[in-house]
Image: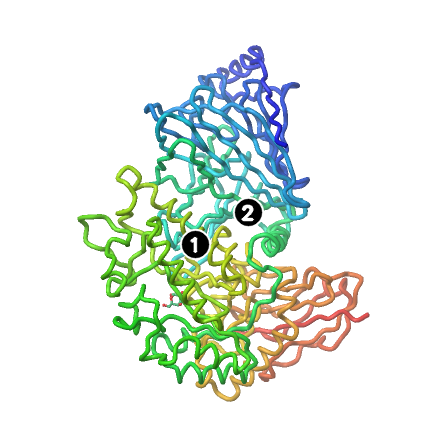
């Protein structure tokens, strides 16, 4: 049963006055420790997040990670401190607020007092803390919800906002989380664009506000994803230093604001982007913010990533413990230009190579407006009889006859104006009346807040999967973002609710598909990595990181994605992009969830042979270690001529070390991380029999974990753009 402990403290005037006196003397005041204060621990044993209730009944930040936050206060702040845990706007607080409300009577200020807290454990190893705050004047309640995952050093935070005012209120800011830190902080963001995702950039934070955000509502990660790193005291390092990662579970516009008040504290505000999204909230309706996730390590980003990978496999991804299949995709190979005969011939080749799943990409649908390019057909999800006269089920049967599973591409949220759907329902799209339609990739976004649209999209997916039970894999794409954010469904005074209501409706739709079709695996795509938040990924098995498939670029991109995501979630497909050798392209794909996107009939016999060996090696040896092992990033392609990563099985009996030479040079030894120092390992190379590269001197040797970590292994590839994969197996 829930019991809220009501705690009230009397205001200690001497205590506040002493603080104000020191402000007048020039420096920000530091409030003295109060014996009466009540500390609430919402983090894990290591990833500490402590809050306290002050003598004024307000909730304050106390500690985030190793840092204690001084209780800063400025003159004229009415007794309030600069370190409130969830600062409301208009009362006391003069910096970026976490919550801002226009009340039903037009008043713009909000105040929040501590009401009580409640702790519980929803599942073993998980601690949940709920802290209840209330405005002393208005009937507005805010509940801060924290979950701490002990074995992973992961903390989640979200807010639940409710009111019973006589009419709707307008939420103008609604952060999910707003901890504070002090001192020297280094931010690493990952900016980019289509086909150029995940470019890391680190900078030292300084007084003022640094904002990383997205304003595109849908496909919201087009220019940056909703995650970042923070280094404490220095820029983030791989194997040392206190490091935080922040990740927001939200597929719409997001905002991270790093507000250094110049007085000794930097607030990390994270949540839905309030820009253009003032939210009208009716009385009695719950407004729950998305979860902001914090992961922590004091041993650098390497350990943080390993914790996060395990956490994501266990709690975030669909079926995070199920091995991912080796897949053949036809997009790069055929584009829209295929027919039944072509696809079936690819099945034959896929079977010869030992592949497990075939994914039929864009272009299979549209009758009146056949989808033969991207100008038409989107929205009309019936098979194009000119291309596939015997339908999808026939193809799925043909695939099954060759031992392959079968999957299809869909983009259910979008429509081309040249489609039967648009002609029948021009009012179903997001647009603003009176303005000319703005197209991206010749398409528009369907207004999912309209129930008939949600029903239509859900019906399309259901019918496809019911009528074609042979389909066991779906790639869900989304290729444009929102401009002219108008809905002909939402009332005039709720137009700015659109972005938030869209994401909620989308989440509902994805959850429904997941529930109704538990056996169908899902790939998340948005013109590449345009939608890679964990809130969406929980309905998916993996994601398509980028339409840039040049393996040289993928080495770097996979390195950066691996900061956050485990390899089994990152689809890596071999293509001809960049004109690299097939050996290099295969090795890069094998360091992620392996797939191939080539017209296999056009491979030379030697390329086919290497591809077949790679598929066999991946299934036989690498898959288990890459998809479920711990990742050690040893040498960064950002700072040297090669990328060296190694995956170590959980029991440390096997390891795969990938050496990707991205430029000429570096003949020195590479040192595998994460091995058991006491164990002895036999070394072999997982080569594809490609020839031309001398054998590594230590091949076949048995070497202890200690010696391998000390002296390493000397690769024999030194030239850009080449690769080697070393296999280490414990001998007992
Ligand atoms: C997007 C995806 C590609 C492919 C095309 C099909 O660009 O990222 O992988 O599916 O759409 O139109």
| Mark 2 burial class by Cα count in 10 Å: few <14, some 14-19, many 20+ | many
Measured as percent of width and height from the top left, residue 340 is found at 39, 82
Measured as percent of width and height from the top left, residue 330 is found at 43, 75
Along the line of sight, which residue is nearer the eye, 574 or 170? 170
Tag shown at residue 509 = 1
| Mark 1 burial class by Cα count in 10 Å: few <14, some 14-19, many 20+ | some
Whereabouts is ligand 1, in terms of quadrant? bottom left
Which is nearer the N-term, disc 1 or disc 2?
Answer: 2
Q: Confirm or deny contact between disc 1 and disc 2 (CB under 8 A).
A: no
Along the line of sight, which residue is nearer the eye, 103 or 566? 103
**Visible in this render: residue 536?**
yes
Quadrant containing the N terminus is top right
Q: Is residue 210 above or below residue 483?
A: above
Residue under numbered circle 2: 245
Determine whether, in the image, residue 231 is placed left or right of residue 495: right
Disc 2 secondary structure class: strand
- Furthest toward the bottom, the residue is 605
Measured as percent of width and height from the top left, residue 30 is found at 56, 22
């Amino acid at each position: 049963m829930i019991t809220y402990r009501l705690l009230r403290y009397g205001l200690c005037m001497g205590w506040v006055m002493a603080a104000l006196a020191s402000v007048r003397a020039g420096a920000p005041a530091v409030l003295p420790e109060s014996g009466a204060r009540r500390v609430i621990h919402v983090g894990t044993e290591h990833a500490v997040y402590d809050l306290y209730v002050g003598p004024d009944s307000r909730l304050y930040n106390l500690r985030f990670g190793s840092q204690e936050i001084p209780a800063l206060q400025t003159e004229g702040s009415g007794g309030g401190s600069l370190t409130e845990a969830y600062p409301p706007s208009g009362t006391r607080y003069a910096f970026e607020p976490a919550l801002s409300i226009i009340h039903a009577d037009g008043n713009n200020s909000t105040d929040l007092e501590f009401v009580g807290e409640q702790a519980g454990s929803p599942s073993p190893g998980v601690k949940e803390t709920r802290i209840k705050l209330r405005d002393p004047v208005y009937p507005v309640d805010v509940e801060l919800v924290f979950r701490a995952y002990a074995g992973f050093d992961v903390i989640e935070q979200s807010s639940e906002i409710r009111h019973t005012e006589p009419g709707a209120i307008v939420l103008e800011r609604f952060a999910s989380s707003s901890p504070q830190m002090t001192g020297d902080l280094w931010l690493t963001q990952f900016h980019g664009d289509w086909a150029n995702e995940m470019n890391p950039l680190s900078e030292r934070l300084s007084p003022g506000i640094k904002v990383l955000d997205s304003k595109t509502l849908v496909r919201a990660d087009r220019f940056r994803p909703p995650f970042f790193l923070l280094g404490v005291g220095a820029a983030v390092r791989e194997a040392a230093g206190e490091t935080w990662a922040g990740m927001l579970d939200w597929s719409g516009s997001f905002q991270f604001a790093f507000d250094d008040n110049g007085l000794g504290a930097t607030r990390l505000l994270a949540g839905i982007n309030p820009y253009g999204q003032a939210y009208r909230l009716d009385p009695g309706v719950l407004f729950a913010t998305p979860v902001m996730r914090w992961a922590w390590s004091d041993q650098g980003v390497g350990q943080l990533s390993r914790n996060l990978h395990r956490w994501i496999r266990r709690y975030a991804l669909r079926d995070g413990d199920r091995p991912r299949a080796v897949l053949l995709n036809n997009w790069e190979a055929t584009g829209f230009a295929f027919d039944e005969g072509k696809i079936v011939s690819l099945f034959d080749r896929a079977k010869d190579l030992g592949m497990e799943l075939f994914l039929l990409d864009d272009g299979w649908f549209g009758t009146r407006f056949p989808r033969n390019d991207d100008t038409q057909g989107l929205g009309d999800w019936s098979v194009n009889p000119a291309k596939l006269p015997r339908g999808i089920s026939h193809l799925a049967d043909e695939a099954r006859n060759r031992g392959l599973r079968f999957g299809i591409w869909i983009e259910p949220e979008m429509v081309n104006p040249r489609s039967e759907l648009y002609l029948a329902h021009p009012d179903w799209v997001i647009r603003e009346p009176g303005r000319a339609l703005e197209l991206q990739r010749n398409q528009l976004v369907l207004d999912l807040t309209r129930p008939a649209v949600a029903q239509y999209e859900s019906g399309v997916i259901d019918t496809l999967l019911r009528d074609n039970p042979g389909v066991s894999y779906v790639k869900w794409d989304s290729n444009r973002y929102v401009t002219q954010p108008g809905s002909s469904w939402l009332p005039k005074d709720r137009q700015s609710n659109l972005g938030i209501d869209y994401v909620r409706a989308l989440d509902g739709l994805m959850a429904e598909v997941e529930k109704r079709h538990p056996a169908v695996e899902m790939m998340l795509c948005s013109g590449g990595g345009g939608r890679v938040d964990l809130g969406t990924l929980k309905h998916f098995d993996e994601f398509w990181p980028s339409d840039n498939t040049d393996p040289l670029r993928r080495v770097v991109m996979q390195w950066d994605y691996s900061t956050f995501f485990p390899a089994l979630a990152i689809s890596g497909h071999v293509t001809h992009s960049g004109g690299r050798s097939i050996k290099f392209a295969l090795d890069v794909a094998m360091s992620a969830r392996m797939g191939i996107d080539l017209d296999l009939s056009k491979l030379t016999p030697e390329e086919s042979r290497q591809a077949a060996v790679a598929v066999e090696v991946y299934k036989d040896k690498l898959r288990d270690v890459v998809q479920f092992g711990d990742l050690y990033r040893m040498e960064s392609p950002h700072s040297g001529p090669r990328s060296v990563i190694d995956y170590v099985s959980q029991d440390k009996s096997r390891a795969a070390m990938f050496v990707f030479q991205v430029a000429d040079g570096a003949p020195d030894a590479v040192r595998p991380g994460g091995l058991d120092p006491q164990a002895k390992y036999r070394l072999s190379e997982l080569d594809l029999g490609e020839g031309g590269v001398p054998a590594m001197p230590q091949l076949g040797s048995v070497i202890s974990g200690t010696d391998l970590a000390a002296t390493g292994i000397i690769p024999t590839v030194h030239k850009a753009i080449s690769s080697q994969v070393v296999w280490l197996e414990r001998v007992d």
